[in-house]
Amino acid sequence: MEIVLISDGPLPLESPVRKLPFFFSCRLIDMSSVTPRIVGDARVAVIELQGTTDAGLRALRGAWESISSIPVLCIVTKSNRQENIQAAALGKTVVIDREISLALLLDRIKKLAGAATSIPVDEGVPKQSAQAFRKCNAFLESICLSAVQNSKIHTAEMRTGAMELFSALQIDGLSDWLKAVHSHHSATYRHSLTVAGYAGAFAEHLGWSEADCQEVIAGGLIHDIGKMRIPLTILDKAEKLTDKERAAVKRHPDFARDILKARLEVPIEIKKMAIQHHEYLDGSGYPNGLKADRISTKVRLITVCDIYVALTEDRAYRPGLSSRDAIVTLKDMSTKLDQGLVLEFGRMLLNRDLGDVSRKSSAA
Ligand SMILES: [Fe+2]
Ligand SMILES: [Fe+2]
């Protein structure tokens, strides 16, 4: 399901609308550019009225037939008279106070859409992988809410997702899992789902117990929870990040600590995977410059999988590395990473046939 987000200029920093792309496939449209062609077959329109000018409102009213056949929500500040008048001037809309909790806003949108809102899975993805994808995605959506609202982490959903993904890896294999993940609209979720798949497959390759495999799968799902506090304008930016934006992204392990510190329901080892996965064995990582003796094997495993996945992902400004080149890069990181794990990770990819588990194979 797709929704269109309409605002007069960039979305305000504190707008609840900014979090919607974590949950739905969204398109941001400037108020002055709304046309039937641009709105397309979107199921819901959400209008952010903060900062709307008279010219913006006139343009939107002029193009109202573009969205009049779908449910329209207006986000307003309850105490702001002008925004309420603007919402009334637009006519048939559902007016929502911007102080609404994200959970309630999602609920309203889903009800208004009146359609199946679960993320579609590509045809050809086997049953178990599709089932695991839905469960893991439900968990990612719930941790996004927990991160934004400082609420309980649903560890039962976490365990179910990890269990289903473990079964999918055993029944269908990693490449089918990657096919399932490929269909997700959010790059941030795709990344976490991919890391979780590699982590589970790698732990299994190492002969770890089922419980340990499922723990690193859960760790893979949760490892970038801190990113839920970073603006999507930075996370989803198509161009290369500026130094300032890169510094903002580097704060995500600190945000993870902040989100998880009071969450007694989350096992300590899983918390460590979220807080320490950018630490390096030689002490040159962040946020705390921990050295090898303070970094557990499970955290090291997540770090290797995380870097490998990041290197092989396509970015708008550069194509992903081939599997082979990514392994070379991991080896070149020398004392920063557990090279015993890197060696085994490379072996796993070779054993499973490079072309099968990786989305790219090295032509050279
Ligand atoms: Fe990270
Ligand atoms: Fe990551």
Image (cartoon, grey):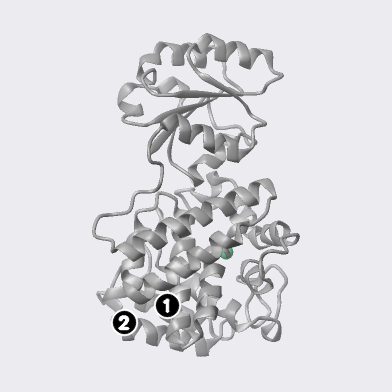
Q: Secondary structure at mark 1?
A: helix
Seen at 46% across and 75% down, the residue is: 200
Any part of residue 57 in sight: yes
Is 140 on the left-hand or right-hand side of 121?
Answer: right
| 2 vs 1, front mark | 1
Residue behind mark 2: 352
Q: Secondary structure at mark 2?
A: loop
Q: Is 281 or 135 nearer to us in this picture?
A: 135
Q: Is 222 or 117 nearer to us in this picture?
A: 117
* Local crowd size for mark 1, using a 10 Å CA cut-off: few (<14), some (14–19), many (≥20): many
Seen at 42% across and 80% down, the residue is: 327
Is residue 288 depicted above or below 95 in this figure? below
Residue 201's tag is 1
Is 124 on the left-hand or right-hand side of 102?
Answer: left
Distance, label 2 to label 1, CA atoms, is 10 Å
Q: Where is residue 315? Give x, y as percent.
A: 41, 57
Q: Where is residue 56? Give x, y as percent.
A: 50, 17
Is residue 31 depicted above or below 331 in this figure? above
Seen at 64% across and 32% down, the residue is: 100
Q: Where is residue 355? Give x, y as percent.
A: 27, 75
Counting residues from the start of the chain, the first of labels 2 and 1 encountered is 1
Kind of residue sitting beneath label 2: Arg
Labels 2 and 1 touching (C-beta < 8 A): yes
Label 2 lies in ligand 2 vicinity (Cβ under 8 Å):
no
* Local crowd size for mark 2, using a 10 Å CA cut-off: few (<14), some (14–19), many (≥20): some
Is 312 on the left-hand or right-hand side of 90?
Answer: left
Seen at 67% across and 60% down, the residue is: 256
In the rendered image, which quarter is residue 134 located in? Answer: bottom left
Q: Is 160 or 280 nearer to us in this picture?
A: 160
Is residue 276 depicted above or below 94 in this figure? below
